[in-house]
Image (cartoon, rainbow, N blue to C red):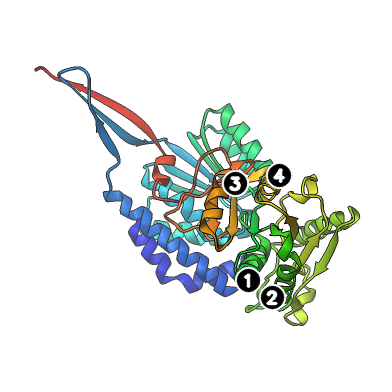
Amino acid sequence: MRAAAQALEQNVEAFAQLVRAETGKTLPLARAEIFGAVEMGFLVSSHGRHPTGYVLPSAREGKNIRVERVPFGVAVLIVTYNAPLPNYVWKVFPALMAGNCVVLKPSPTTALSANRFAQMMWDAGVPQDALQVVHGEGDVASALIAAGPELVSFTGSHRTGQMVVEAGARVLAKTIVELGGSNPLIVCADADLDAAGATAVDSAYSNAGQRCASASRVIIEQSVYDEFRQLFVEKASKLRYGNADDVDVSTLIDEDSVKGFEDYVGRTISQKASATRLGKPANAEVASCCVAQPALIEGLPHDSPISSEEFFGPATRFFSFKSDDEALIIANSSDYGLTGAIWTRNVARAEKMLPFLDAGVVSINGPTHGAEINMPFGGSKNSGNGTRDAGVFSIDEYSDTRVVSTFFEV
């Protein structure tokens, strides 16, 4: 495992170039993601020497009890395209370290990076029988689950996640799902508005909005709404979008994603919302079919289904609030509960709001994305089923528990 992490570290540029070619994201973003994957590899590889169980006392004399972590068996890992290397490493490393055999099913759009990742793992000494890669569309994933693995782990949309959970239940597999989000970033009047604006722009538009943790809803205290909006628009108007190497907002994964994104923006306009297009094209290549121009959507009722719908694309929706209670009502009006952020200089105010914000990952005066590798990642409601990826306890998610009692004569 450590040799594989070292190999990944030594080949960051080659992997970044491949991810750039497959996904359209910029090289700096691809490199940053791969360095994060390297750190996850080192974190998990260190668990080979960590304790994996504990001893329990017994009420009966002459009896010792120990609890062990043991493999499930075969783990089917199904991942999406938006961050290929982190998606592979977050699942493959803990699943293998827990002792399982792994079948990785990547997105069809990132097949080459999955192949190269698997080859790197094999070259590092992972047995090929312990790690295999299977390519295909959704029917392949369905067949893998129907074959009866002991564990299924999936990252993707809520709708597909429901089908994965149902299919896993039919074979009684433990099922880990990390699903979508419609994540709120709350801006209070006493916040550092300039910093909040810069962070909101990054949270909304980085990776072209193709993050489950994007800030797709920005909720602003009414008294500073106009001031914050002006700051946000000024910053977002400077974004360069297109398919060049050095843009701020890169391409979407394919033409269908652009069509779906534009359809969503069009539906908001049909419901009397306004859509302000932001940014500027980086070069003539902007005519690529996979390019989408960033958008700011305003005027939607916070409680309409379209207001909290998840979409993968460079847009965010603005709402206003008069009280903290109203801010929380708007934030929690989504069926998702993945991430969130609260911006205020008054930490006590944030701490009072925090228990009532329904999200699995929350930052105070920070972005809605950017989970560190030692942090468990996942959410509530339609964002997951209570399981977590990454983090120092990830091996517990990918292993089962066995209790061993030893009886001896006193």
N-terminal of the two: label 3 or label 1?
1
N-terminal of the two: label 1 or label 2?
1
N-terminal of the two: label 2 or label 4?
2
Q: Residues within 10 Å of mark 3 (few under 14, many from 20)?
A: many
| Residue 134 visible from this viewpoint | no
- Give the alpha-carbon distance from disc 3 to disc 4, as whole Å: 10 Å
Q: Which mark is residue 333?
A: 4
Give the percent coordinates (x, y) of residue 60. Answer: 20, 17
Residue under the point 40% across and 45% down: 393
- Residue labelled with disc 3: 357
- Give the alpha-carbon distance from disc 1 to disc 4, as whole Å: 25 Å
Kind of residue at badge 3: Leu
Q: Secondary structure at mark 3?
A: loop
Kind of residue at badge 4: Ser
- Give the alpha-carbon distance from disc 1 to disc 2, as whole Å: 7 Å
- Give the alpha-carbon distance from disc 2 to disc 4, as whole Å: 28 Å
**With 400 as the anchor, is 15 left or right in this view?**
right
- Residue labelled with disc 1: 198
